[in-house]
Amino acid sequence: MRRIGSSCLLLLLSICPVALGQVDQPPQDEYQHELSLAGTALEERDYDAAKAHYSRANELTHGHMVEPLRGLAWAELRLDDAQSALTHAQSALTLARNDVERGNIHNLLGAILYSEFISDTTTTSKLEESEKELRSALQFNPRLVGAYFNLGKDLLKESRDEEGVTMLRKYLELVPDAPNRGEVTRLIENPRLSRGELAPSFSLQDTKGETISLSSLHGRIVLLDFWATWCGPCIASLPDIRKLAQQFPADQFALISINEDEDAGAWKKFLANEEMHWPQCRDKAWALFHSFGLAPARRIVVPAYIVLDRDGLVLHKARGLEDASSLSKVVQNAISTKH
């Protein structure tokens, strides 16, 4: 296990500025400093540190400011602590001073409830509650673009495709250059994809200089093999991975190994000494690893494997040496399934 820094994830939960004049002196400077540290920690995906700094800022203001409470809720959501996130977001809502703040907090509440549904899809009431919060967010702030995206996903999960597509189109209308435009377009074109876990759009360059993207892999079963040279179990699983690379027809299956080393030199040196003739890519800043939600906060846990179906839906996630040898059956079953 290794802790790392990374660039900020796409946030569809905008954080409102706070009127600092409401903070009593002399803690104001310290308060601002804690908020600044918390913001930096969020950008680096160090959610434990972000939580600690937001907690300190909240203490300094005796729990009477919106920003620390909203920040706490956001950090806790990323740390998979939905209950604490819900508590702090609800507290923030009672302190909201205007419709923009209220809209943002309702959007955050909708995202938290959606995460609870995703963790247990039998809790359909959470999805319904999430929808209500997101509609409230748009009532308070019709220009809150992230709420259109979040509400669109909710509605598609409820199989209300026409309404969901309308929300997603509105989102792209407001943000034509959205970083997640590819994902949103795929959902608009094929709402069925929303009923599963849709792989994030990605584009990687392999060691031959060729670009490998989610769209270029469409129509094949895909195995993403996340590994690192410093990971003993990754090296031990290499024989099984090497067999998989040759086991299935190339027009039906693609194996992509994705390296998570901080040191690109170590990766290149390892490849030079090993027979790894299938596509080899490097995950710069660990962006793809985290976009799949493979580990909380900034942790890298490898080996990790993801199997995608022909449409880019996640069929299987696994970690550890014992899972590598079982991947063949997972891939075989996926290939045998009629498209």
Image: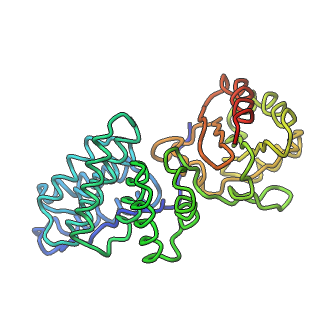
Q: Colour scheme used in the picture?
A: rainbow
In this rendered view, identify the residue nearer to me: 14 or 140: 140
Which one is in front, 2 or 319?
A: 319
Quadrant hosting residue 215 = bottom right
Q: Quadrant of residue 82?
A: top left
Vertical order, 143 against 11 (above or below): below
Left or right of 76, for residue 206: right
Q: Is residue 41 above or below residue 261?
A: below
Q: Residue at x 87, y 39 (%)?
A: 274
Residue drawn at x 41%, y 41% as measured from the top left = 118
* Residue under the image location 89 percent in, 39 percent down: 275
Please give the name of the residue rendered at 33% of the width and 66% of the height, measured from the top-left corner: 36
**Residue 149 picture quarter:** bottom left
Residue situated in front as seen by the camera: 284 or 253? 253
Horizontal side of 301 relative to 309 (left or right) equals left
Q: Where, quadrant-wise, is the N terminus in this rendering?
A: top right
From the top left corner, tell me how far across and down residue 75 is, in percent.
34, 51
Q: Quadrant of the C terminus?
A: top right
Residue 297 percent location from the top left of the image: 45, 46
The correct choice, above or below, for 225 with respect to 107 in the image is above
Count every numbered label the image shows and give the total. 0
Q: Residue 73: x percent and y percent?
A: 28, 52
Locate residue 66 relative to residue 36 in the image: left or right: left
User: Which residue occupies the foreground of this view, 207 or 197?
Assistant: 197
Residue 134, x across and y down, in percent:
29, 59
